[in-house]
Image (tube, rainbow, N blue to C red):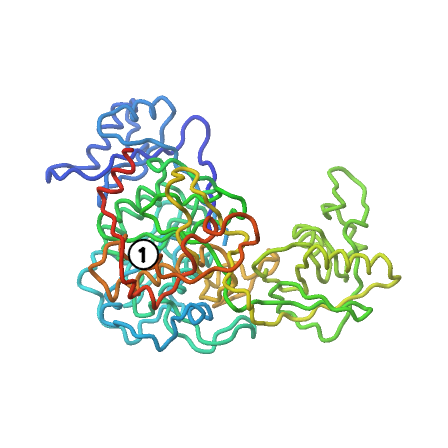
């Protein structure tokens, strides 16, 4: 997922001036109007340098570099709905479709499905990935009005039919892996024999493998609000059918000052459903930032597959932890050292968290640390492995022997280390086991209630977002170690970023059978046909963790009853 951080300094910064829908007057020139407005507040010949983006294809507005005084003047002008600072968003980040009941043999309307275009607003895409081959796909749909403007050596095909990039990038190629991963979950082609270093090997595919993909690269890796609005402006005008938005703000903001809510509102006007991840700021209440009722807000849940790791102590006792550790142990045991037992000299030391480490104490040993940062620093100083006191739903990828233990088991291992003259341990390569408790809401998934409009329940629904195997960019980081990078075509990742494209894929699947349904009708069909979600870690009421339940693709085709909502209904809510 992506979190937001403030952009610019305290004097001049990028502001978004939102002006609602485009006038119907054919003679109206949005860009000329935007320049005219700027000329009234910016003195001299600096107007052209101040205008950053002009939104003119699907809605009206612009972004510009302004100071507070200029912002206030623009906010008071006729036709201006809101003026707010642009923020930057930074990225957080197979078996799942079978678990959801959408097997390869499922009935599909392939002709209609191949006419559907999924818009991915993200970090771009790696077009050479086999997940985006166009074998067997017909010509580009006649309705498509977009461009392949990927820049550089970027090439489209009959699968990736559109590509755009925005200021801050030089092409639409994905150098971080996030957008590629997301795109393959929602619409990747079927590829056999895929796994991650021997783990989870099988057939990988997206929810609607015959659909087309259009990418809008707004993140590199941070994602500016003004670029996101420009991507919405283009995606709507290009003719996408579903928009996947695996981005979220840290904090919820007023709807009329939220560019994701604004862009998705105008998408809804044109019959386009926008699916957004709830965010990775859980499990505390009211941490969700996807609050607008027309957004389809998705929580992350587990699937019936989990990755575990075994720790064998010198006394023969075995503990089960979590990690995606791809290193075979070969029966070798290494000495253990406790991070908090180390001492060192100098300023700014925090031995209890291994902020200061004596290389002689950790080199060639397994380090027990109370947090992941300590384990990472220990690696930098020559540690061979780590045992982290950390309880999390996902399994972290590591290229060294490492695992996470719950507090009780961590204390037992620590006690063994203190009480044994020569404590040793072996960390085995990870294994895959069945998780009979699935689906459960991930602890990191942002929760409701809705902090902006409490009457509108959020999130809307849950979908798989833990340990999802999908396509990746070879330029992206290949592990959570932040030490090792290796060329990876496919990788395992977790987050509401991964849950979001599962719902976008199901929405496209439903739309392929009901092409005349509105975004609200599709959303209703999916929400009213869900499956139950298991315990929610007792952090708060379940509905505020997973919404209506876990997604159920096949049943969503036949809901029996749908609740439709029109633009006028949303407008009435906003006005009240």
Judging from the image, what secondary structure is the residue with disc 1 in? strand
Frontmost residue, 270 versus 487: 270
> Which residue is identified by label 1?
119
Local crowd size for mark 1, using a 10 Å CA cut-off: few (<14), some (14–19), many (≥20): many
Residue 44 screen position, x and y as percent: 29, 23
Frontmost residue, 183 versus 534: 534
Q: Quadrant of residue 52?
A: top left
Q: Is residue 115 left or right of residue 333?
A: left
Can you name the residue that lies furthest to the front here? 560
Frontmost residue, 448 versus 199: 448
Q: Is residue 208 left or right of residue 2?
A: left
Quadrant in the picture for the C terminus: top left
Indicate whether 407 appears above or below 21. below
Indicate whether 7 appears above or below 566. above
Residue 335 screen position, x and y as percent: 80, 63
Instruction: Name which residue lies at 71% across and 62% down.
Output: 385
Can you name the residue that lies furthest to the left here? 26
Frontmost residue, 307 versus 68: 307
Residue 408 screen position, x and y as percent: 72, 56
Q: Is residue 49 left or right of residue 99?
A: left
Specify whether residue 196 is in view: yes
């Amino acid at each position: 997922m992506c979190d937001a951080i403030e952009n610019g300094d305290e004097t001049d910064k990028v502001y978004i001036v939102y002006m609602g829908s485009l006038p119907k007057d054919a003679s109206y020139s949005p860009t000329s109007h935007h320049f005219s407005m700027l000329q009234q507040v910016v003195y001299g010949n600096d107007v052209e340098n101040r205008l950053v983006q002009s939104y003119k294809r699907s809605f009206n507005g612009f972004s510009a570099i302004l100071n507070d005084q200029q912002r206030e003047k623009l906010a008071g002008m006729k036709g201006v709905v809101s003026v707010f600072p642009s923020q930057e968003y930074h990225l957080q980040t197979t078996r799942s479709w079978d678990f959801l009941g959408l097997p390869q043999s499922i009935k599909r309307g392939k002709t209609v499905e191949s006419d559907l275009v999924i818009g991915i607003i993200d970090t771009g895409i790696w077009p050479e990935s086999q997940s985006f081959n166009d074998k067997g796909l017909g010509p580009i749909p006649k309705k498509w009005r977009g461009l392949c403007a990927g820049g550089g050596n970027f090439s489209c095909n009959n699968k990736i039919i559109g590509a755009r990039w925005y200021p801050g990038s030089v092409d639409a190629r994905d150098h971080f892996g996030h957008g590629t991963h997301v795109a393959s979950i929602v619409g990747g082609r079927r590829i056999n024999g895929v796994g991650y270093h021997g783990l989870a090997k099988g057939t990988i595919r997206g929810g609607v493998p015959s659909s087309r993909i259009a990418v809008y690269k707004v993140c590199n890796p941070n994602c500016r609000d003004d670029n996101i609005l420009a991507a919405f402006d283009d995606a709507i005008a290009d003719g996408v059918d579903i928009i996947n938005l695996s981005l979220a703000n840290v904090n919820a903001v007023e709807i009329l000052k939220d560019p994701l809510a604004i862009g998705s509102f105008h998408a809804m006007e044109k019959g386009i459903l926008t699916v957004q991840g709830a965010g990775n700021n859980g499990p505390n209440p009211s941490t969700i930032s996807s609050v607008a009722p027309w957004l389809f807000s998705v929580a992350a849940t587990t699937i019936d597959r989990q990755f575990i790791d075994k720790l064998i102590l010198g006394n023969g006792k075995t503990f089960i932890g979590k990690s995606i550790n791809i290193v075979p142990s070969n029966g070798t045991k290494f000495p253990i050292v406790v991070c908090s037992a180390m001492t060192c000299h100098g300023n700014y030391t925090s031995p209890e968290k291994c902020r200061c480490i004596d290389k002689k104490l950790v080199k060639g040993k397994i380090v027990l640390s109370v947090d992941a940062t300590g384990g990472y620093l220990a690696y930098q100083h020559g540690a061979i492995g780590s045992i982290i006191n950390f309880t999390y739903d996902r399994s972290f990828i590591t290229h060294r022997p490492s695992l996470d233990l719950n507090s009780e088991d961590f204390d037992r291992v620590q006690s063994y280390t203190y009480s044994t003259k020569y404590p040793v341990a072996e960390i085995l390569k990870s294994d895959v086991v069945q998780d009979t408790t699935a689906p459960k809401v991930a602890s990191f998934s942002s929760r409701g209630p809705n902090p902006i409009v409490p009457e509108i329940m959020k999130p809307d629904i849950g979908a798989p977002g833990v340990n999802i195997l999908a396509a990746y960019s070879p330029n992206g980081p290949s592990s959570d170690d932040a030490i090792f990078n290796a060329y990876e075509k496919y990788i395992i990742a977790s987050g509401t970023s991964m849950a979001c494209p599962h719902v976008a894929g199901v929405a496209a699947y439903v739309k392929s059978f009901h092409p005349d349904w509105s975004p609200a009708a599709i959303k209703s069909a999916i929400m009213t046909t869900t499956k139950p979600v298991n315990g929610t870690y007792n952090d708060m009421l379940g509905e505020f963790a997973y919404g209506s339940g876990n997604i159920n693709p096949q049943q969503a085709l036949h809901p029996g009853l749908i609740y439709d909502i029109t633009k006028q209904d949303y407008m009435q809510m906003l006005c009240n």
